[in-house]
Amino acid sequence: MRRILVLGGTGWLGREIARRARDSGAEVVCLARGESGSAPDGARLVRADRSRAGAYDGLGGEWDEVVELASEPQLVESALDALAAHAAHWTLVSTVSVYADNSTPGADETAQLVEPQNLAEYPDAKVVAERASAAKLGDRLLIARPGLIAGAGDPSDRLGYWPARLHRGGSVLAPTMSQRFVQFIDVEDLADWIVRAGEAGLTGEFNAVGEAHTMDDFFRAARSVAGFDGELIAVDDDELLDLDVHYWAGPRSLPLWLPLEAAGFAQRDGSAFAAAGGRSRPLADTLTRVLTDEISRGIDRPRRSGLTSREEQVVLAAVRRLSEE
């Protein structure tokens, strides 16, 4: 029986990887503090704080696969020191944020990486994690670089904001959509590929991304799934920024909206991923599952990304006033 260790395994993506690994018939162990949840049924949780000495002492034996989800160099390097000699294959989940250039559509895995300067920054920390892993593991390493990860249970609220907001109806504030794209990988598809790639011993770097959809197509599909028949009020970038609406994610944002000069971020080349068995389900499939999940969690709940109902009303009122001047 294959033995798979997930360094994490209780958060969103890690738990899905552990679940898929369990379903493959492997013995699955998750090493985590357990603060973000529990391990899936059938997987064993070893509770440990990886920032403390002796965190890996509760693990024994050899591993067919280790999956690392952390970005903090201290955690990544301590795991490598403790476990690299005992792992036949290792997968580091990195990110497309490691690339220095976000302006070029269709860039592949050979694109230049960020040169780390501030390890408190996510891209910088992931580059250091990639380099440390490569130095320790050599040809046993798979680096998966997903872009936006989406699906039911997403704690970031980025993609989910839109089907939830459209489901609520009324007038909806949106960015202008010309020359804009949305690219994501469904969490289930990513987890499935990571488990299958590990079993096959795949190595190298892969942009784990799905199809790049125009923002028009994304909203068309989201409107259909949500049954939206209201008005989308598209506002240009300068006006949104003047009204203190933010790009991409976080409080007071319009999620998935990126500056036009960062258009390449949502148009990464995923051909190597597809050739290696990566799958990307239809847009409407993910949106339907996400909307069902959004409804179950509460459409009007507090969110990590997006505008609150009150914030959107204030911005829309300001947009209308400006249009009348």
Image: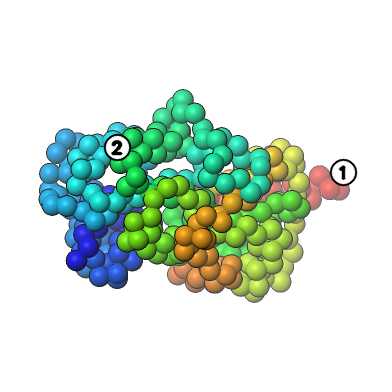
What residue sits 19% from the left and 36% below the top? Answer: 52
Q: Position of residue 250 (x, y in %)?
A: 53, 45
- Near-viewer residue (215 or 98): 98
Can you say whether 273 is above or below 99 in the image? below
Q: For residue 81, what is the image quadrant?
A: top left
What residue sits 53% from the left and 68% below the top? Answer: 281
Q: Which residue is mark 2?
A: 136
Q: Residues within 10 Å of mark 2 (few under 14, many from 20)?
A: some
Q: Residues within 10 Å of mark 1 (few under 14, many from 20)?
A: few
Q: Which residue is mark 1?
A: 325
Secondary structure beneath label 2: helix
Q: Position of residue 195 (x, y in %)?
A: 35, 61
All told, the count of numbered labels is: 2
Quadrant containing the N terminus in the rendered view: bottom left
- Near-viewer residue (242 or 218): 218
**Position of residue 170 in the picture relative to residue 72 (left or right):** right
Amino acid type at image mark 2: Lys
What residue sits 54% from the left and 41% below the top? Answer: 110
What residue sits 30% from the left and 64% below the top? Answer: 21
Q: Residue furthest right?
A: 325
Quadrant containing the C terminus in the rendered view: top right
**Position of residue 162 in the picture relative to residue 38 (left or right):** right
Q: Position of residue 306 (x, y in %)?
A: 57, 51
Labels 1 and 2: the sequence-earlier one: 2
The colour scheme used to paint the residues is rainbow
Amino acid type at image mark 1: Glu
**Position of residue 174 in the picture relative to residue 80 (left or right):** right
